[in-house]
Image (tube, rainbow, N blue to C red):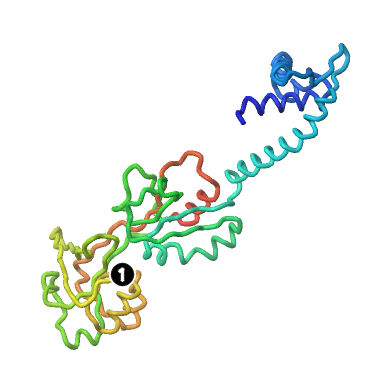
Amino acid sequence: MELDNLNVLASFLTVAEERSFTKAAKRLGVSRSAVSHAVRGLEERLGVRLLARTTRTVAPTDAGEQLISRLRPALGDVESVLDQIVGLRERPAGRVRLLVTPLAATMVLAPMLVSFNRRYPDVVLEVTTTQEGRTELVASGFDAGIHLGESIQRDMVAVRVSRDQRLAVVGSPQYFTLHPRPRSPHDLANHRCINLRAGAPRPYRWEFENGGDVVNVDVSGPLIVDDADLMIRAAVDGLGLTFSFEEYVAPQIASGALVRVLEDWCPPFPGYFLYYPSRRQQSAALSALIEALRI
């Protein structure tokens, strides 16, 4: 139903409840003539008188009473729905659909899920993980995404949600008993490397930088995966070297299960950002998530 029709019906119901065009106009915040015109137009459209008018009073006719009996609960339901929708803007509630990479899910989202839920129990986070970072959020039905800053399109609003990151080349002690430690990225050509295919046709090219020197290496080895946990497990078991986020492999390095090499060739870079298409008409649930993740 068009909004004008709802306004006309609301005007009629208000006049019937107030038994006065003047009081109805005051309650609705419009002129008396506007209310009178709306009700008269409704009666002409239906071809039946809805209100009996005298110089002193206004009262519903039988037809008017029948319309009121159906109209009051119907408009009440509409008002209730509108109040709920406004509440989504003012109170964190409802569903937030997120598109994140698997590593972002582990490193950014997972540590805050319990505390966020305790603070905002009416918010449901619906998380989809994908290696591909250039999915169209709006067209795919997502409210926001989390990815490395360098992968986010410039027309998106981006909020930093992690500290700077570094990459790390790691291998197990067992591996290094059989192979010399690389001193330069160029030495990786002589090593067995475990690589990650992160949503691209080809495996990731290992990128290094040291004092302005940039080196990109196409490594080779016995395993190419799209799962970071499998990649790290294989490295711990001695299958070969791998390349991952320093933070992600920090526990294995600390325990001695993995040994880091080529550290001087792995400078920091901007980490993860939450991104979304617009600041306008942002739901309270998404605003709450942004503030919970922002650093």
Viewer-proximal residue among 247 and 21: 21
Taking the spot 51% from the left edge, 53% from the top edge, the residue there is 96
Q: Is residue 129 left or right of residue 268?
A: right
Residue farthest toward the top in the current orientation of the protein: 55
Can residue 31 be seen here?
A: no
Residue farthest toward the front in the current orientation of the protein: 47
Q: Position of residue 1 (x, y in %)?
A: 62, 31
Taking the spot 31% from the left edge, 68% from the top edge, the residue there is 226
Q: Position of residue 153 (x, y in %)?
A: 32, 47
Q: Position of residue 92 (x, y in %)?
A: 58, 51
Vertical arrangement, residue 134 with respect to residue 118, above or below: above
Taking the spot 21% from the left edge, 84% from the top edge, the residue there is 175
Q: Which residue is mark 1?
A: 246
The amino acid sitting under disc 1 is Glu
Q: Position of residue 37 (x, y in %)?
A: 70, 15
Asked which secondary structure carries label 1, the reply is helix
* Quadrant showing the C terminus: bottom left
Vertical arrangement, residue 242 with respect to residue 16, above or below: below
Vertical arrangement, residue 16 with respect to residue 293, above or below: above
Viewer-proximal residue among 53 and 115: 53
Viewer-proximal residue among 154 and 37: 37
Taking the spot 62% from the left edge, 25% from the top edge, the residue there is 4
Can residue 122 be seen here?
A: yes
Q: Is residue 245 left or right of residue 145?
A: left
Q: Is residue 263 left or right of residue 215?
A: right
Residue farthest toward the right in the current orientation of the protein: 56
**Mark 1 closeness class: few <14, some 14–19, many ≥20 residues within 10 Å:** some
Q: Quadrant of residue 194?
A: bottom left
Q: How many marks?
A: 1
